Image (cartoon, rainbow, N blue to C red):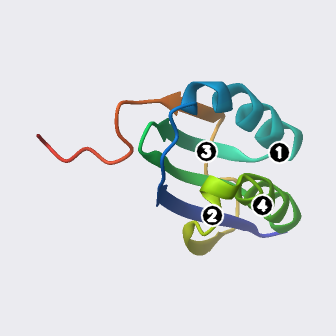
Amino acid sequence: MEYTVATFYLFADLPDFEAKQAPIKAFCDSQAVLGTIILAPEGINGTICARRDGMGRVLDWIEAEPRLDGLSLKFSAAPDQAFLRMKVRLKREIVTMGR
């Protein structure tokens, strides 16, 4: 069965980004989704991989948060799971601008 890889980001006001780390990680784990998601006060950025059904549930769950609705998404296919584990990291910014 083929896997789906999703890359996504959204600039959003997330002053409570730290509180979102554990719930996102737990939900991804429950859906066998692996990869990395970065949370910061300015939004979310990630690359994750899963079978189609798990991917859909995780993306729907993330976008159920009104501030995260409308993720900029890109998809690709992979014959195997592309990642070894799931990480949800907290950072100062989701995209380093070199400033």
Quarter of the image with the C terminus in it: top left
- Mark 3 and mark 2 lie on one chain; the one further toward the N terminus is 2
Q: Are marks 2 and 4 in contact (CB under 8 Å)?
A: no
Q: Is residue 97 left or right of residue 23?
A: left
Secondary structure of the residue carrying numbered label 2: strand
Query: Can you give x and y, in whole percent of width and height, for residue 39 in the image?
Result: 51, 38
Cα distance in 3D space between marks 2 and 1: 13 Å
Q: Are marks 1 and 4 in contact (CB under 8 Å)?
A: no
Q: Are marks 3 and 2 in contact (CB under 8 Å)?
A: yes
- Disc 2 marks which amino acid? Val
- Disc 1 marks which amino acid? Ala
- Mark 1 and mark 4 lie on one chain; the one further toward the N terminus is 1
Query: Can you give x and y, in whole percent of width and height, for residue 51 in the image?
Result: 81, 62
Q: Badge 1: how crowded within 10 Å, few (<14), some, or many (20+)?
A: some
Q: Nearer the viewer, mark 1 or mark 4?
A: 4
**On the image, numbered disc 4 is attached to which residue?**
55
View extreme (left): residue: 99
Cα distance in 3D space between marks 4 and 3: 11 Å
Q: Is residue 33 above or below residue 29?
A: below
**On the image, numbered disc 3 is attached to which residue?**
35
Q: Is residue 63 above or below residue 75?
A: above
Q: Is residue 37 left or right of residue 81?
A: left
Cα distance in 3D space between marks 3 and 2: 9 Å
Quadrant in the rendering for residue 70: bottom right
Identify the residue shown where x is 80% and y is 32%: 26
Q: Badge 2: how crowded within 10 Å, few (<14), some, or many (20+)?
A: many
Identify the residue shown where x is 72% and y is 37%: 24
**On the image, numbered disc 1 is attached to which residue?**
32
**On the image, numbered disc 2 is attached to which residue?**
5
Secondary structure of the residue carrying numbered label 3: strand
